C-alpha cells in the first residue's frame, strides 16, 4: 500500500515546476496526478483520471458485496427449489449465481460511481473552482517525509492538503 499526499498549487507555472521537481526526485510520473478546474489546459502535467477523481473504486466494491449477497440468496433459492438434475439441491448453481451477482453488481455500481466525484476530494472543490491545481502524489511510506520536505522547501507558495494513509496500488 502507498500513501497519497495532497498539495494545492496556486497556478499552472507552480504546478509544472512541482512536476519537474518530483520527476527529478525520481517519483514515477504514473504516481503524480494533477486535478484542475474543468477545461484548464494541463499540458506538461500528468492529469488525474477517473481512478483518482471519481468514486469508481468504492462503488465497484460496494456493488460487488451487494450483488454477491443478492446472488447468494437467489442462488440458494434456485438450488433448493429448482434442481436441474435429480431431486437434490444444486449447490453449483448457488455459487455460480452468487459470482454472477457480484460481477453484475460491481459493473452496474461502477457505472454510477464513475459519475460521482470522489468524496476524498470534496475538501478541495472550492480551491479548484477558484483556479488552484490539486497535486496528488502516491508514494511508498518510506518516501513520504522526504517528498513533503522537498515540496515544502521548493514551493513555499503551495499549501499542504493532507495525507491519506492507504491508497490501493492500482489506481
Image (cartoon, rainbow, N blue to C red):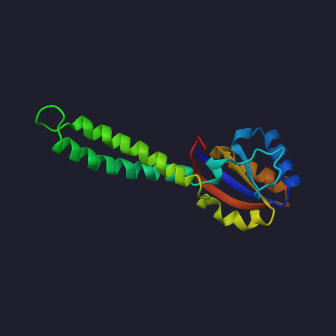
Q: In the picture, which quadrant includes the C terminus? A: top right
Residue 93: name its quadrant. Answer: top left
Up/down of 121 relative to 29, above or below: below
> What is the count of numbered marks?
0
Residue 141 at x, y percent in the picture:
63, 46
Residue at image position (47%, 49%) is 108
Relative to 26, residue 52 above or below: below
Q: Nearer the viewer, residue 160 or 108?
A: 108
- Residue at the far left in the pictured view: 87
Image side of residue 26 versus residue 139, left or right: right
Image quarter of the N terminus: top right
On the image, the x and y values in percent for residue 23 come to: 80, 40
Residue at 69% over, 42% down: 31
Q: Which of 154 and 29 is in front in this view?
A: 29
Q: Which residue is drawn at 61% across and 58% down?
A: 118
Residue sticking out furthest to the right: 13
- Indicate left or right for 77 with 18 as reference: left
Q: Where is residue 40 in the image (x, y as percent from the top left)?
A: 81, 54
Amino acid at each position: 500500500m502507498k500513501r497519497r499526499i495532497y498539495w494545492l498549487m496556486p497556478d499552472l507555472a507552480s504546478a509544472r515546476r512541482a512536476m519537474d521537481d518530483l520527476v527529478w526526485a525520481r517519483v514515477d510520473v504514473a504516481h503524480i496526478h494533477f486535478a484542475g478546474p474543468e477545461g484548464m489546459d494541463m499540458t506538461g502535467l500528468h492529469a488525474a483520471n477517473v481512478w483518482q477523481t471519481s468514486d469508481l473504486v468504492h462503488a465497484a466494491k460496494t456493488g460487488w458485496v451487494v450483488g454477491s449477497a443478492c446472488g447468494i440468496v437467489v442462488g440458494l433459492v434456485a438450488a433448493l427449489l429448482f434442481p436441474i438434475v435429480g431431486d437434490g439441491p444444486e449447490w453449483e448453481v448457488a455459487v455460480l449465481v452468487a459470482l454472477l451477482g457480484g460481477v453484475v453488481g460491481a459493473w452496474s455500481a461502477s457505472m454510477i460511481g464513475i459519475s460521482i466525484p470522489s468524496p476524498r476530494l470534496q475538501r478541495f472543490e472550492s480551491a479548484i473552482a477558484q483556479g488552484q491545481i490539486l497535486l496528488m502524489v502516491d508514494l511508498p511510506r518510506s518516501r513520504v517525509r522526504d517528498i513533503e520536505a522537498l515540496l515544502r522547501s521548493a514551493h513555499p507558495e503551495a499549501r499542504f492538503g493532507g495525507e491519506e494513509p492507504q491508497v490501493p496500488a492500482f489506481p
